[in-house]
């Protein structure tokens, strides 16, 4: 009797890059990694996404956002940003994700790099308490959409689980 059908669909497919990022962070959270290790791992993973040209994690200390980890071609001079200033400060103040399709058209934007064309900032929060944020720049206009928002908000949630009560 001959076999029937194509069973190639049953083979396990390679995990998507975003799934790998989330699984890595979840593993680190479960292993009780330090907050700094979580920040570094998240940035290291996110910079591998082609359209993400600079990635930083800022955490709230007092009335400022303080850069804790970053990946990209160069450092930013903005290592402290007052909550409420710029796109980063706005996201920290409101607790809402900010997507800026064209930074040249947003008066809140604080320039880090001349090449940056768009930005997404996702708060790391627990309910209404904002601990910090994930800041991602791109050198293309309108680089970020609902997929990025959903993915980065999931990542922010897992980061929050790893730092809540530890910072």
Image (cartoon, helix red, strand yellow):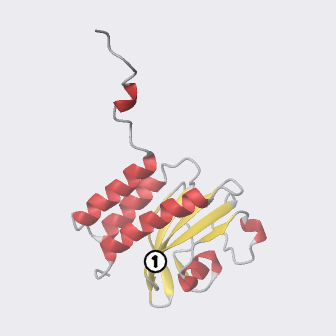
At 42% across and 53% down in the image, what residue appears? Answer: 45
Choose between 124 and 151: the one closer to the eye: 151
Q: Is residue 113 visible?
A: no
- Picture coordinates of residue 75 (x, y %)? 53, 63
For residue 131, side relative to residue 54 (left or right): left
Residue annotated with mark 1: 132
Q: Can residue 108 be seen in this view?
A: yes
Question: Most extreme residue toward the left, as rendered?
Answer: 31
User: For the point 55% across and 47% down, which residue is it?
Assistant: 50
Residue 41: quarter of image: bottom left
Image height of 109 relative to 55, above or below: below
Q: Which of 81 and 163 is in front in this view?
A: 163
SS class, disc 1? strand
Above or below residue 50? Residue 74 is: below
Q: Which residue is drawn at 38% across and 57% down?
A: 22
> What residue appears at the point 40 percent right and 51 percent down from the top-left corner?
19
Q: State which quarter of the image contains the N terminus.
A: top left
Relative to 43, is 10 above or below?
Answer: above
């Amino acid at each position: 009797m001959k076999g029937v059908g194509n069973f190639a669909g049953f083979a396990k497919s390679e995990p998507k890059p975003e799934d790998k990022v989330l699984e890595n962070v979840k593993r680190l959270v479960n292993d009780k990694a330090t907050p700094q290790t979580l920040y570094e791992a998240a940035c290291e993973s996110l910079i591998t996404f082609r359209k993400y040209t600079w990635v930083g994690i800022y955490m709230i200390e007092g009335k400022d956002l303080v850069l804790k980890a970053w990946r990209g071609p160069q450092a930013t001079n903005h290592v402290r940003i007052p909550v409420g200033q710029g796109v980063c400060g706005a996201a920290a103040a409101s607790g809402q994700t900010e997507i800026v399709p064209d930074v040249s058209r947003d008066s809140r934007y604080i320039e880090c790099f001349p090449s940056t064309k768009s930005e997404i900032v996702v708060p790391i929060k627990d309910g209404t308490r904002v601990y910090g944020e994930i800041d991602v720049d791109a050198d293309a206009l309108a680089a970020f959409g609902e997929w990025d928002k959903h993915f980065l908000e999931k990542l922010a949630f897992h980061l929050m689980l790893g730092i809540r009560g530890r910072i």
